[in-house]
């Protein structure tokens, strides 16, 4: 039996503070927490690492990703898989430099001890060349996989610079969903939000509503995404959407200030607002324990 | 029956009205009146990485707006989400038109919504709608 029990003392030593926990799932999820099943598992979501970024919002841009990798390697129990939800690299006009950054990123994250590490692109990786360089390093930009009774769907809403999934991908999604029972356990990964979180800040997907509409008949569907550089939780009907923190700089809450400029680095609290997420997944109850980890322990 | 004097007066009045309608366009103000259609404002602008030629646009509530925009370099976008107005794409050398009628006063954002490079997130402007 897998017990999703985090070694809190070890984690506190690593992180300096405890991670915030967000429970998500069907009614009765809290009661089901004490009934761990054999298929329960953990995965980790990291996002928006922007390798290659240089600037005042993160004076340790060259070290933050490595710190996050070290923190993931300290997790116990070890997650079944790790996924990076886009913007692995910071954009560049130079195709050679883009490949250089992808090479460096891949080399750094190869230090993750978890064997199964997955990726999806962000607009900084893929929008300027429609995913060409990304594909050379990480393969298809949209795909599916199954793990312990959960069907995972990875969507690409960035290779089209207009932030659209496109008819071809939507047709592919429709065909994939057609093979599933209505009570299937589904998790969707994307970079941008599939709903109109804040179109004024380009926090949306042009045709994301079509994908959400396709998911609506399924009673167990949840979306994890990145792009907005902060933890955020939203529901479209019964479908939960969870945004992850960034590993380069935080952005302001939607509409909280006139511009979507990065929040300033705080020397008194370095790495504040940055972090990654561990997701405790219980397929039998279709519930999730979201634990937010800071990127590094307090100075 | 129409007398000759009445017909001449009518022609003068129509001529005056036609000149009044054509004058703003002739002066390049980008506005015109039409007898039946509501007045509209045409705003011409350009976009390049990473700047709109107009950083602020001031319009009036209830007056239809036509944004005519062209790119000076790479493909861009132009969207005013608060009024559900968007160009499909703004291509270099081609004029894209975005039409909307502001139905509320206030200050709103317009932005490029087609990823265009490192400064994409800063490519935006302010739309001010007044009474």
Image (cartoon, rainbow, N blue to C red):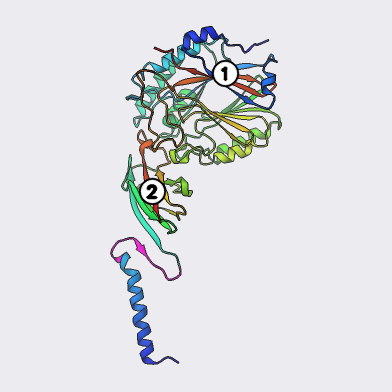
Quarter occupied by the C terminus of chain A: top left
Labels 1 and 2 positioned on one and the same chain: no
Would residue A103 appear left or right of A165 to someone viewing this image? left
User: Which region shows up in magenta?
Assistant: B25-36
Element under disc 1: strand
Residue A161 x, y percent position in the rendering = 44, 38
Tell me, yes or no, whether the two marked residues, 1 and 2, touch with CB atoms within 8 Å.
no
Q: Is residue B44 visible?
A: yes
Image quadrant in which the N terminus of chain A is located: top right
Q: Residue at x 37, y 78 (%)?
A: B14
Is A216 in front, or is A169? A216
- Mark 1 or 2: the one toward you: 2
Magenta stretch, overall SS: loop
User: Which residue is rendered at x = 63% and y = 38% of the image?
Assistant: A214
The residue beneath circle 2 is B127
**Residue A294 vs residue A96, the one in the foreground:** A294
Please report the residue visible at 45 percent of the width from the left and 66 percent of the height from the top: B37
- Residue under label 1, please give it: A43
Judge from the rendering whether residue A64 lies leftward or rightward of residue A280; answer left or right.
left
Q: Chain of mark 1?
A: A
**Is B51 part of what is drawn in magenta?**
no
Is residue B31 within the magenta segment?
yes
């Amino acid at each position: 039996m897998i017990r999703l029990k985090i070694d809190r003392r070890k984690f506190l030593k690593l992180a300096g503070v405890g991670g915030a926990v967000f429970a998500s799932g069907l009614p009765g999820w809290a009661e089901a927490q004490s009934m761990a099943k054999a298929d329960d598992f953990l995965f980790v979501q990291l996002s928006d690492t922007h390798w290659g970024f240089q600037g005042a919002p993160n004076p340790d841009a060259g070290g933050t990703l490595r710190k996050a990798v070290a923190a993931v390697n300290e997790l116990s129990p070890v997650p079944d898989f790790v996924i990076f939800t886009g913007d692995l690299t910071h954009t560049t006009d130079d195709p050679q430099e883009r490949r250089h950054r992808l090479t460096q990123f891949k080399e750094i994250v190869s230090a993750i001890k978890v064997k199964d590490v997955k990726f999806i692109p962000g607009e900084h990786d893929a929008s300027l060349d429609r995913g060409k360089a990304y594909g050379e390093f990480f393969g298809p930009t949209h795909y599916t996989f199954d793990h312990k009774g959960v069907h995972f769907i990875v969507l690409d809403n960035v290779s089209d610079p207009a932030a659209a999934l496109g008819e071809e991908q939507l047709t592919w999604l429709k065909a994939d969903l057609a093979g599933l029972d209505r009570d299937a356990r589904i998790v969707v990964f994307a970079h941008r939000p599939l709903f109109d979180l804040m179109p004024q800040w380009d926090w949306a997907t042009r045709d994301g509503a079509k994908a959400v509409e396709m998911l609506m008949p399924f009673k167990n569907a949840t979306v994890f995404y990145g792009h907005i550089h902060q933890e955020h939780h939203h529901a479209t009907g019964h479908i939960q959407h969870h945004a992850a923190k960034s590993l380069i700089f935080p952005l302001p809450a939607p509409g909280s200030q006139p511009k979507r400029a990065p929040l300033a680095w705080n020397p008194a609290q370095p790495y504040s607002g940055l972090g990654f997420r561990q997701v405790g997944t219980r397929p039998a109850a279709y519930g999730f324990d979201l634990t937010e980890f800071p990127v590094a322990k307090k100075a | 029956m129409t007398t000759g004097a009445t017909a001449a007066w009518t022609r003068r009045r129509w001529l005056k009205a036609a000149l009044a309608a054509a004058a703003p366009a002739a002066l390049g103000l980008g506005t015109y009146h039409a007898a039946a259609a509501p007045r509209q404002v045409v705003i011409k602008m350009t976009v390049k990485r990473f700047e709109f030629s107009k950083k602020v646009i001031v319009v009036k509530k209830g007056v239809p707006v036509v944004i005519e925009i062209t790119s000076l370099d790479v493909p861009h976008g132009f969207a005013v989400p608060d009024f559900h107005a968007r160009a499909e794409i703004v291509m270099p050398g081609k004029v894209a038109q975005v039409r909307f009628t502001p139905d509320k006063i206030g200050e709103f954002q317009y932005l490029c919504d087609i990823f265009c490079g490192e400064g994409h997130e800063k490519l935006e402007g302010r739309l001010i709608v007044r009474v």
